[in-house]
Amino acid sequence: MTKILHVEKDNWQEVLSSSQPVLVDLWAGWCGPCRALAPTFEKLAEKYGNEVVFAKLDVDELPELASQFGVQSVPTLLLFQGGEVIGQVVGLQSYEKLASFLDRFTSPVARN
């Protein structure tokens, strides 16, 4: 299974300094759609884990990061490259829609 980074204050810099794109799932434990998205996020990590870093950020634990990026609802997925947000998806989405989103930023050659 592909490792998913659990974002905390002390490892946030890993997201910003990663040489690979980083897909961050901003979620909350009380959020039903967030819990429903979790298995899809894990499946995406399995497929795209060779070329994208997958990370989860609990907005209740790090509200300052959520507000820094203008996140007003969860789940929100932010795709970072070079420390900048290059893509965003808000709300519960299907695996197919999220895979299509990632396909715009990745190379099919790297996928297994």
Image (cartoon, rainbow, N blue to C red):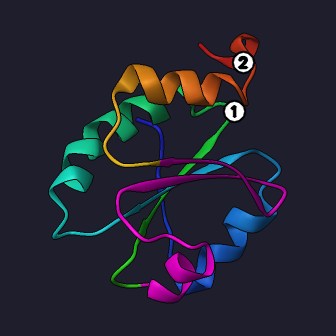
Can you identify the residue that label 2 sits on? 110
Give the residue displayed 19% in from the left and 63% down from the top.
Answer: 31
Give the structural element (helix, strand or loop) at label 2: helix
Q: Is residue 12 above or below residue 98?
A: below
Name which of mark 1 and mark 2 comes first in the sequence. Answer: 1
Q: Amino acid type of disc 1?
A: Glu
Q: Residue at x 70, y 12 (%)?
A: 108
Whole-Å distance between the Cαs marked 1 and 2? Answer: 7 Å
Determine whether the residue tagged by mark 1 lies in a helix, strand or loop: loop
The quadrant of the rendering that contains the C terminus is top right
Query: What residue lies at 36% left-to-right and 56% top-to-bottom?
Result: 75
Question: Can you give x and y, in whole percent of width and height, for residue 80 in the image?
Answer: 70, 54
First to last magenta residue range: 62-89
Is 40 left, or right, of 18 in this rendering?
Answer: left
In the rendering, at what x and y percent does residue 79 appear?
A: 64, 49
Q: Which residue is mark 1?
A: 51
Q: Residue at x 35, y 35 (%)?
A: 93
